[in-house]
Image (cartoon, rainbow, N blue to C red):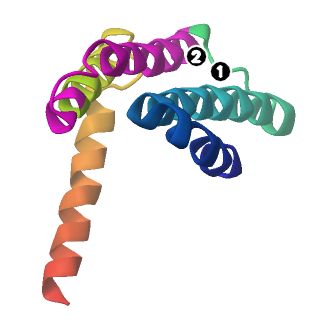
């Protein structure tokens, strides 16, 4: 969080949305490496290379789409970047159908709890 906040404070005034995209990409890669090293060090679990490569490819793919679509409407370029990011996660089998079903279940449960309040 500190890397992302500090990076954005530095990059956004210089490069606006492209700075934010670059900082987000760097933050995601940092978190991926940190999570893998903590899993290995604390639990003795070595994450499969496919998961590491899939996460990195998705982050870089989304960042590249934002860079290539910087002249588009910000909402459309963000949707395109998210679609590429999600597509690469699925293509690399980093996220499975059961992962998506679990996520949608959590969202549904959260919406139901929120709507009762």
Q: Are marks 2 and 1 in contact (CB under 8 Å)?
A: yes
- Residue 104 vertical placement versus 78 (above, below): below
Would residue 36 appear left or right of 25 to someone viewing this image? right
Most extreme residue toward the right is: 41
Question: Up-down: is 86 above or below 106?
Answer: above
Q: Quadrant location of residue 71?
A: top left
Between discs 2 and 1, the one toward the N terminus: 1
Crowd class of label 2 (few under 14; some 14 to 19; many from 20; radius 10 Å): some
In this view, the residue in front, 40 or 52, is: 52
- The residue most toward the bottom is 117
Q: Quadrant of residue 72?
A: top left
Which residue position is annotated with label 2? Answer: 52
Residue drawn at point x = 41 percent, y = 20 percent? 63
Q: Secondary structure at mark 2?
A: helix
Query: Quick check: 35 above or below 1?
Result: above
Q: Is residue 62 magenta?
A: yes
Which residue is pictured at 45% across the width and 30% down the height? 21
Foreground label between 2 and 1: 2
Residue 90 in the image, given as x and y percentages of width and height: 30, 18
**Image location (x, y in percent) of residue 34:** 73, 33
Report the side of 51 relative to 73 (left or right).
right
How far from the left and from the top, in percent, is residue 82? 27, 29
Question: In the image shown, does 55 or 73 lie closer to the viewer?
Answer: 73
Q: Residue furthest front?
A: 14
- The vertical placement of 5 against 116, above or below, is above
Q: Which residues are magenta?
A: 50-77
Which mark is on residue 47?
1
Q: CA distance from mark 2 to mark 1?
A: 7 Å
Residue 68 or 42: which is nearer the viewer? 68
Magenta highlight: main SS: helix
Q: Secondary structure at mark 1?
A: loop
């Amino acid at each position: 969080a500190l890397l992302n906040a500090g990076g954005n404070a530095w990059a956004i005034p210089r490069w606006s949305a492209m700075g934010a995209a670059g900082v987000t990409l760097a933050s995601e890669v940092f978190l991926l490496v940190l999570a893998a090293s903590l899993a290995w060090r604390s639990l003795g679990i070595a994450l499969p290379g496919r998961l590491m490569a899939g996460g990195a490819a998705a982050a870089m793919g989304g960042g590249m789409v934002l860079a290539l679509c910087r002249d588009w409407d910000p909402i459309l370029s963000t949707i395109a970047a998210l679609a590429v990011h999600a597509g690469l996660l699925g293509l690399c089998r980093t996220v499975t159908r059961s992962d998506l079903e679990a996520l949608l279940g959590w969202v549904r449960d959260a919406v139901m709890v929120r709507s009762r309040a």
